[in-house]
Amino acid sequence: MAQFLISLPALERNAQLLAEVAGASGARLLVALKAFSTTAGLGTLRPYAAGCCASGLYEARLGARHLGGHVAVYSPAYRESELAELLEFAHHIDFNSIPQWQRWRSTCLAHPRVQSGELQLGLRINPCFSTGHTALYDPCVPGSRLGIPAEQLHGTDLTGISGLHFHTLCEQGAQELIDTFRAFEKQFGSLLASPQIRYLNMGGGHWITKPDYDRNALIDLIREIREMYKVEVFLEPGEAWAIHTGVLRARVLDVFESLGYRHAILDVSASAHMPDVLEMPYRPDVYAVHPSGNGTPAVSLPGEHYAPAGEPGAKPHTYRLGAPTCLAGDIIGDFSFDHPLQVDDLIVLDDMSHYTIVKTTHFNGVPHPDIAVLQADGKIRTARRFGYADFESRLG
């Protein structure tokens, strides 16, 4: 059976690094549940995180239960019933548009938790400053529905708003954040400096735990903002908490040649289990478990050796890794190996904790991989095993 395997010690290493940044800068770092919400790992993050950021009611409830602390919520639009529940336990609720703010303003301002200051209200801003490379993940592209441009704030009654929020980055470094903040500051600096604004949320997309990330530059920027504008600063990294902490372990089901390609069918699906491979697109690092291997995926087990795959043609044996679904394009990619692949060979797809498990489906009835964790004592614990009942229950 295929398996997502997450290393709890690796999660803790990332969390410790993020906690150091928070301590040095004075910022509050939240776990972006849209990137990583595997409950078996949230307990490891809980001592280090200030709380969570959620994209709606369900994520907010999950974060409140498994992370505790601060619950920040942003959604492009709220239903009346979910907003009513969020008002009872969230700490920040940010609105995406002026019509949304105007629609729910009276309801929110009448709530005792808002009146006491326990719950604060904010607006998501669109600084219209792109630094990304993939339009699918860029909230600042023309026609974006995410966030409020500067011109729409003119003449709007902002009574009751105490926070500003922007989120424009995706897998980027400190310099992109600095550049974005300067663009934001030019347009919204006077509002940020007003006494009514108490917090600034600079969203996610920060690769803070990558080895080459300039953490000192980030710390300096946060300190500057806190000193100049007298606001509390929040960051919402998601990937940074979980990057390089997990793998997807798969088996080869079939090997054959067809139409000029050698195919290896795995027991996992790009569409169902790692859709960023198709959406972003993203090419995962792949390893074959083989006695001659010397590679190091994010999670390695005693007694196993990992031979890294290469680009097509770089090594003697090239295969198109595909899924056991009927979707023609459900292809992980073309990879080359030192040795021929055989049925039952173990293939490890690297860095599969973030933006994978949260996006999985039961498409085509393909069995869902188990979710397991590697504990500090070296033991593997299966946190969730999926079966037919899970497939049937999702479809009514």
Image (cartoon, rainbow, N blue to C red):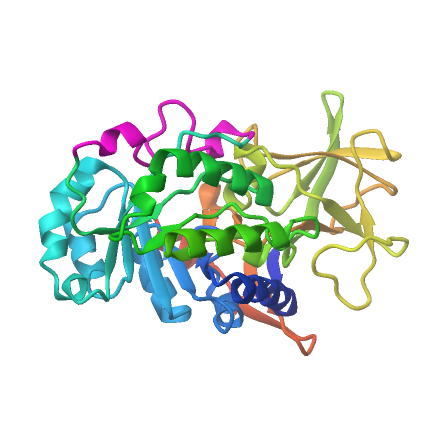
**Labels in figure, total:** 0
Residue in the image at 18% along x and 65% along y: 113
The image shows residue 110 at horizontal and vertical percentages of 9, 58
> In the rendered structure, which segment of residues is drawn in magenta?
133-155
The residue located at (32%, 54%) in the rendering is: 73
Q: What is the x, y in percent for residue 347?
A: 72, 50
- Which image quarter is the N terminus in? bottom right
Image position, residue 324 (x, y; %): 59, 40
Q: Is residue 13 above or below residue 249?
A: below
As for residue 141 lying within the magenta part, the answer is yes
| Residue 140 vs residue 351, the one in the foreground | 140
Q: In the image, is 284 to the left or to the right of 82?
A: right
Give the residue at x 75% y 65%.
301
Give the camera-side residue of 189 and 83: 189
Asked whether residue 33 appears in the rendered view, the answer is: no
Q: Is residue 33 above or below residue 282?
A: below
Q: Is residue 374 visible?
A: yes
Q: Is residue 165 left or right of residue 161?
A: right
Residue furthest out toward the front: 228
Q: Is residue 252 left or right of residue 161?
A: right
Q: From the image, give the main secondary structure of the stretch colored magenta.
A: loop
Percent coordinates x, y for residue 386 in the rendering: 48, 60
